[in-house]
Amino acid sequence: MSTYTVEDPRKVTTRRLAEMKAKGEKIAMLTAYDYSMAKLIDQAGMDVILVGDSASNVMAGNDTTLPITLDQMIYHAKSVMKGVKRALVVCDMPFGSYQGNSIEALASAVRIMKESHAEAVKIEGGAEVLESIQRILSAGIPVMGHLGLTPQSINKFGTYNVRAREEAEANKLIEDAKLLEQAGCFALVLEKIPAELATRVSKELSIPTIGIGAGGGCDGQVLVMHDMLGINQGFSPRFLRRYADLGNAITDAVGSYITDVKSSDFPNEKEQY
């Protein structure tokens, strides 16, 4: 079991991420939704912690990311911020909080920043949400973009399959990526697109790209914490590497506790006053 050693203990900022890309240093990003796990992930040396709207799935048990509300995202982000000292904390803007109304988008982003103390927001989409991104950026709020498979649009796609395999969609993704960079986004998540396309986008942009199911040519990688730790056992896409089997470990530990309680083995004399 190898433990990562943080060589640079400085607080990670959007500027630091740009420096990392320039130096060819890969960026590690992982989701978190609560204080305790965020603290552990930060202590391990994570560069970026994403308070993902995937909380809708792994924390609330919904089938999609769509049901989670702005209030719920603020709650999760506020909890995460209390456990983090080094990592840059980015909060997803949930479905319905920015699409189609740039004034509402700014109000949503301001609430996230003021109430949770998160350090940036993430928005799914390209040209269709550009006005919202520009308005948020005009307020001095850092924005991370997100292209490729955008889960908030799952009802439009109708599938979680790989995106941008066809030339037309690939060309639009490249155009959108450059559009987001020109608008002022500090980084870009590329989800579930061909590795060759992700590598091309990463080389053509000056801002960092963070891939999930987009190959090794991106400037960084992100996974959902529950997936890579084996807590969410029903999700096994090709791009996922499991680094632990906490699902079974937790079930076994709880089972042992139940057995000890039922048999009066717990608590013993040393475990009471």
Image (cartoon, helix red, strand yellow):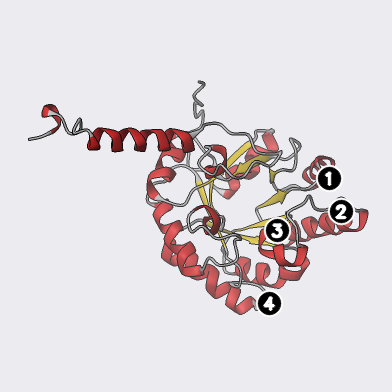
Three-letter amino acid code of the residue under disc 3: Thr
Residue sitting farthest toward the right? 167
Task: Say which residue label 2 marks.
Answer: 170
Position of residue 186 measured from the top left corner of the image (x, y, whole percent)? 65, 53
Contact between marks 1 and 2 (CB within 8 A): the answer is: yes
Q: Can residue 117 be seen in the rendering of this structure?
A: no
> Which comes sooner in the sequence, label 3 or label 2?
3
- Choose between 249 and 27: the one closer to the eye: 249
**Viewer-nearest of discs 4 and 3:** 3
Residue identifier under label 3: 150
The amino acid type, in three-letter code, at marker 1 is Leu
Most extreme residue toward the left, as rendered? 273
Between the residue at mark 1 and the residue at mark 2, the CA separation in whole angstroms equals 7 Å
Q: Residue at x 75, y 38 (%)?
A: 215
- The answer to whether the residue labelled 3 contacts the one labelled 2, judged by CB atoms less than 8 Å apart, is no
Q: Is residue 39 visible?
A: yes
Which of disc 1 and disc 4 is earlier in sequence? Answer: 4
Crowding near the residue tagged with mark 2, few <14, some 14–19, many ≥20 C-alpha atoms within 10 Å? some
What type is the residue that disc 4 sits on? Answer: Gly
The residues bearing labels 3 and 1 have C-alpha atoms spaced at a distance of 16 Å
What percent of the width, then of the height, locates residue 192? Answer: 74, 48
Q: Which mark is residue 197?
A: 1
The disc placed on residue 100 is 4
Which callout, 3 or 1, points to the residue nearer the camera? Answer: 3
- Report crowding for label 1: few under 14, some 14 to 19, many 20 or more residues within 10 A (C-alpha): many
